[in-house]
Amino acid sequence: MGKDAQILAILAGGRFCSGQELAKQLGLSRSAVWKVIQNLQSRGIEVFAVQGKGYRLAQPIELLAKDHIHQNIAARRETFPGKIEVLWEIDSTNRYLSQQSVSSGAAGMTCLAEMQSAGRGRRGRTWVSPLGGNIYLSQLWKFNGGPAQLSGLSLAAAVAVVRVIHQFGVKEARLKWPNDVLVSGKKLAGILLEMTGESNGPTKVIAGVGINVRLPEIALQEIDQPVTSLQSLLGRSIERN
């Protein structure tokens, strides 16, 4: 875990922590701690710096935790079909699984990340992926048949995402063909499927899902279309795990 992740984990609960305390815990100078704080701020994390008290997040943040995710899955079903990986920063969760599938990637393997530097949407568009606020998830599946037999898979995946969002209480979420989830014309989620394989099979499919859970102001300034988030729609914080 890098210094950014370590400091964010310490501050995640929302309490004040002095620069001296952070420096001692991580073996850094106080100036190095300040540089990390500035880097977090540049990535959309609101950090207050108060003289005499130290640093504190504007609001508590829930970091992704693999053990917590496994526990939530186990509470709903007996088994999960694949390995789960939780990464701090990656260019793209889809690209990561594509690389893994060439070697040891097994069907059902799932990758989540706190942040993407090159998240992708449809038609090569960038999916703005701020740190620690949303869900960036990709899952690898393998099928015996060719891509022609999987023509409805993108729609099925999108419908599954909409159903989950409805369960959270956002009943007005609608699917815009083929794979955008909108609320009152504003984008809440997107699904990107990438397939590789021979015409007669087998075929590998990577399903990428991005859901806006909490969008900081700095991220909104980078997005070139109307967007919304679960937190703004529901008026409460959402447990990402």
Image (cartoon, grey):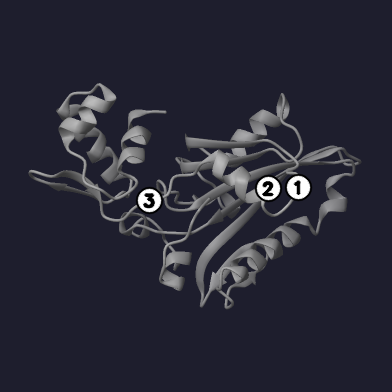
Residue that badge 1 annotates:
78
Task: Residue 142: give x, y in percent of width and height.
Answer: 80, 40
| Residue ID at (73%, 44%) | 80
Residue 26 appears anywhere in the view = yes
For label 2, the SS is helix
Amino acid type at image mark 2:
Ala
84 left or right, relative to 114:
right
Compared with residue 220, is residue 14 higher up or lower down, i.e. above or below?
A: above
Amino acid type at image mark 3:
Ile
Q: Do the numbered discs 1 and 2 sit on residues whose CB atoms are within 8 Å?
A: yes
The label shown at residue 196 is: none
Given residues 8 and 137, the one toward you in this image is 8
192 left or right, relative to 34:
right
Residue that badge 3 annotates:
61
Given residues 3 and 192, the one toward you in this image is 3
User: Dot 2, crowdedness within 10 Å: few (<14), some or many (≥20)?
Assistant: few
Task: Residue 235: give x, y in percent of width and height.
Answer: 41, 71
| Residue ID at (65%, 61%) | 161
10 left or right, relative to 49:
right
Compared with residue 79, is residue 104 higher up or lower down, i.e. above or below?
A: above
Q: Give the CA distance from mark 1 to mark 2.
A: 6 Å
Residue that badge 2 annotates:
74
User: Dot 3, crowdedness within 10 Å: few (<14), some or many (≥20)?
Assistant: many
Q: Give the CA distance from mark 3 to mark 2.
A: 24 Å
